[in-house]
Amino acid sequence: MTGTQSFAVLIVEPGRARVCRFNVELRGESLWRTTTEELARRLAAARPDIVAVAGRLDLATELADDLRRRRLAESVFIITPAEDGEPTPTGQIQVALPQRVSKLKPEELVQRLVRAVLAAQARTPVSPLTGLPGSPMLRAKVEQRLVADERFVFLYLDIDNFKAFNDVYGFARGDLAIRMLGRELIEATRVHGGPEDIAVHIGGDDFAVITGTERAQAIAEQIISAFDAKAPELYSQEAKELGYIEAPSRRGEPERYPLMTVSIGGVDTSRRRVESYLELAEIAAEVKTYAKELAGSQFVMDRRRD
């Protein structure tokens, strides 16, 4: 059996609820009546992120320990029905994730399962251009923090006048500009960020940073300062002296474009409640658009409150 299905997890919190939907790929589903060794061989080829084992506790525990020891699964859940005639402890279920843990209540099991699924989604290749993780990790980290009701600042960045620069100097030099901005994100989050901060290359010349309220200003200012100092070096001497380049507009007419700058739009979830990743992205895009309407490199925070 092959194909893709999806499942939704409804997460209810005081005063609100949200649905997180995950895609599930079904590949080679079958009835496995086999030994632990044979099962491990099959899993080595499938490389699952999460394994749920239902069966006798002693056999399920042995299998889970073996899978973790061989590093064939990041997270192993042991779900064991009660033996015949054995009373089931009220509200408890046996779980191992990813080390052996004590029995958990159902709501704790669901919380751990959701975190494991989000972590699995986040394990994606980095951008070959910048070495930064991509949008799947960004979405996973944002949704994790929203589910946990954490307060954070979302910075959304892109390069102003990048298309004109790319048209005049070619995509190879355009890649240099993108890599430059990526390096400045890494450096700024290293100097001013915290251990949980992340910098992400969404794609093209779009980037994002997740950080704390008290660190956002310093990170944004360092990115702007460094990019403004280094971006002119990508232009010809004539363009640097003039302060602009000429390129065809969307109507095909010659138009002057200033040297590249960077615009940053910020959203602080401690100022306004955000319900989803999509809502956060829309707000950040709106703020960034406002920043791009201003001359030069700009950092604009959304000042609106609930």
Image (tube, rainbow, N blue to C red):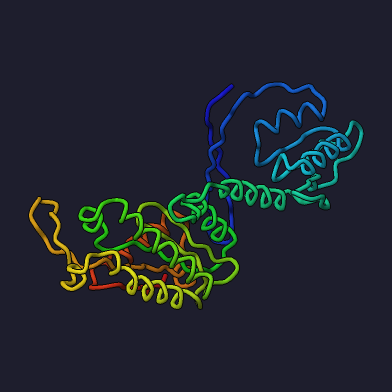
- As displayed, is residue 49 above or below residue 28? below
Residue at image coords 75%, 49%: 98
Image quadrant in which the N terminus is located:
top right
In the image: residue 259, left or right of residue 298: left
Residue at image coords 14%, 61%: 246
Q: Nearer the viewer, residue 278 or 233?
A: 233
Q: Position of residue 156 (x, y in %)?
A: 39, 63
In the image: residue 85, left or right of residue 150: right
Q: Position of residue 36 (x, y in %)?
A: 82, 30
Q: Nearer the viewer, residue 185 or 197?
A: 185
Residue at image coords 85%, 41%: 88
- Count of number-bearing discs: 0
* Residue farthest to the right, as pictured: 85
- Say which quarter of the image contains residue 248: bottom left
* Residue farthest to the front, as pictured: 237
- Say which quarter of the image contains residue 85: top right
In the image: residue 173, left or right of residue 249: right
- Say which quarter of the image contains residue 158: bottom left
Q: Position of residue 267 (x, y in %)?
A: 42, 68
- As displayed, is residue 112 above or below residue 51? below
Q: Position of residue 114 (x, y in %)?
A: 63, 49
Residue at image coords 49%, 49%: 136
Image quadrant in which the C terminus is located:
bottom left
Q: Nearer the viewer, residue 60 or 105?
A: 60
